[in-house]
Image (spheres, rainbow, N blue to C red):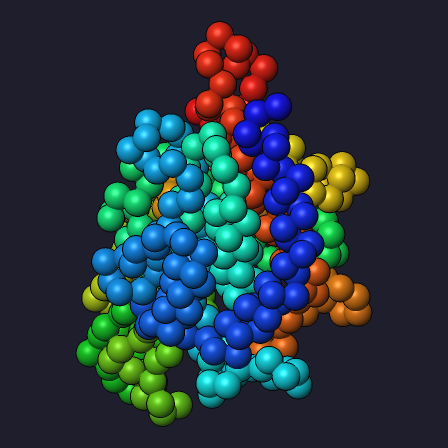
């Protein structure tokens, strides 16, 4: 029996025995949310728990977020697999009537990052007690997932992923029942960029639009024509979508304004198309606005790339999910147009993101709402899922090449 195979049942036992402790950790984090790059108390809390188990976490360069290796260490020459959890909260009021509701006005863990952090802490603590791991599990507690371009970009830039063979993560899914895991090969979330368009003209009287630039009319054309033209320039299978979320111009009904502003997001599932998106948007806005005479300024902020799941990584997650919830508990996850900065990790290593079912009954409590909550039985499922996936990936790479033809690899 390999070390990884021997550790599997021990992980399952550990998760069951420490369920109450993990629930308490999640509730503490939920009650004390912090925004991106300000997660100082969250970082200190997780750091203390890891050090108490004999581990040696180190803080990321910005002062929040942690990296903690479990196993022989990268210097031992054994493979390294990365597990990632995000630790930040959202600027939303917590609307739940529960004992663990947010104690901080206007802040809430409304996306499940408290669960993600608890799961990864559980994995680190469970693996810390296992001898002879076939490699190193690098646990990354990442700050600022909710920001653009996201803390994941900083993790990549700081070299945290260098030398790793792959990375896994999970995300709460309130549409999936607790005890099930959603998987999908290829794009599972979309890239998300921010677009801001400003039009300027001399202004004037609405009685004489021919003597000036009819700025509101020009804005209307950009609002409607640019998304329509975009759909004719890109393969529909790329899933590109430009949606405006804010439009502003003028204050008086009989005065043509001098300035108009549009704000929206560009989302796309295809990584290659994402690379060309900025040029497409800039060109179309200039083209549509050109006939109006308005001066045009476009601010395009690249947000996060799509999360494109590596097939071999998904195969390892599927094997881990079958060990955790059984074959009937594995479901196909639909693609989401939401953004997730775990996509930056693919700049260095193959990645795979799973959906963790958190729905425990009643109406689903959707993400990014102050009412969001989870069925806490999902925590133990998440611990076992990520631990089994990491052990499976390490075992596949630890097998001598001549004997590894049937093993799943991240590369």
Q: Is residue 223 visible?
A: no
Is 213 displayed left or right of 267 in the figure? left
Q: Position of residue 285 (x, y in %)?
A: 32, 56
- Quadrant position of residue 71: top left
Q: Quadrant of the C terminus?
A: top left
Is 398 displayed left or right of 9 in the figure? left
Q: Quadrant of the N terminus?
A: top right
Q: Residue at x 56, y 43 (%)?
A: 387
Q: Is residue 106 visible?
A: yes
Q: Which one is in front, 253 or 48?
A: 48
Q: Position of residue 189 (x, y in %)?
A: 51, 48
Count of marks placed on residues: 0
Is 361 located above or below residue 173 in the figure? below
Q: Residue at x 50, y 72 (%)?
A: 29
Q: Position of residue 356 (x, y in %)?
A: 63, 52
Q: Residue at x 49, y 18 (%)?
A: 399
- Residue furthest to the top in view is 402
Q: Which one is in front, 75 or 111?
A: 75
Q: Position of residue 153 (x, y in %)?
A: 31, 51
Is 158 displayed left or right of 310 in the figure? left
Q: Residue at x 35, y 60 (%)?
A: 65
Is 307 located above or below residue 125 in the figure? above
Q: Which one is in front, 128 or 284?
A: 128
């Amino acid at each position: 029996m390999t070390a990884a195979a021997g550790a599997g049942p021990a992980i399952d036992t550990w998760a069951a025995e420490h369920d109450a402790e993990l629930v308490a950790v999640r509730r503490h984090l939920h009650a004390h949310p912090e925004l991106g790059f300000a997660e100082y108390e969250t970082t200190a809390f997780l750091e203390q728990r890891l050090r108490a188990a004999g581990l040696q976490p180190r803080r990321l360069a910005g002062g929040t977020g942690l990296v903690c290796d479990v196993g022989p260490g990268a210097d031992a020459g054994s493979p390294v697999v990365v597990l990632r959890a995000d630790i930040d909260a959202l600027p939303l009021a917590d609307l739940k009537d529960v004992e663990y509701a947010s104690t901080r006005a206007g802040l809430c863990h409304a996306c499940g990052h408290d669960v993600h952090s608890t799961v990864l802490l559980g994995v680190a603590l469970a693996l810390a007690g296992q001898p002879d791991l076939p490699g190193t599990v690098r646990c990354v507690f990442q700050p600022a997932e909710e920001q653009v371009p996201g803390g994941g970009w900083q993790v990549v830039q700081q070299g945290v992923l260098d030398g790793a063979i792959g990375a896994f993560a999970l995300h709460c899914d309130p549409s999936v029942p607790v005890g099930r895991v959603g998987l999908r090969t290829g794009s599972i979330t979309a890239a998300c960029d921010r677009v801001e368009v400003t039009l300027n003209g001399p202004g004037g009287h609405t009685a004489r639009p021919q003597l000036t630039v009819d700025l509101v009319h020009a804005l209307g054309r950009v609002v409607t024509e640019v998304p329509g033209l975009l759909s004719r320039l890109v393969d529909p299978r790329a899933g590109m979508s430009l949606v405006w979320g804010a439009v502003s111009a003028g204050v008086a009904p009989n005065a043509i304004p001098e300035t108009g502003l549009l704000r929206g997001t560009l989302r796309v599932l295809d990584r290659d198309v994402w690379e060309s998106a900025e040029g497409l948007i800039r060109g179309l806005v200039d083209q549509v606005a050109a006939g109006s005479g308005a001066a045009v300024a476009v601010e395009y902020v690249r947000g996060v790339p799509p999360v494109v799941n590596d097939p071999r990584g998904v195969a390892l997650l599927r094997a881990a999910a079958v060990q955790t919830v059984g074959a009937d508990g594995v479901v196909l996850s639909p693609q989401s147009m939401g953004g997730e900065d775990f996509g930056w990790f693919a700049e260095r290593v193959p990645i795979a993101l799973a959906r963790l079912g958190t729905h425990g009954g009643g109406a689903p409590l959707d993400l990014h709402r102050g009412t969001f909550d989870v069925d806490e039985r999902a925590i133990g499922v998440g611990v076992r899922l990520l631990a089994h996936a990491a052990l499976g990936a390490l075992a596949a790479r630890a097998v001598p090449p001549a004997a590894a033809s049937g093993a799943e690899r991240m590369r």
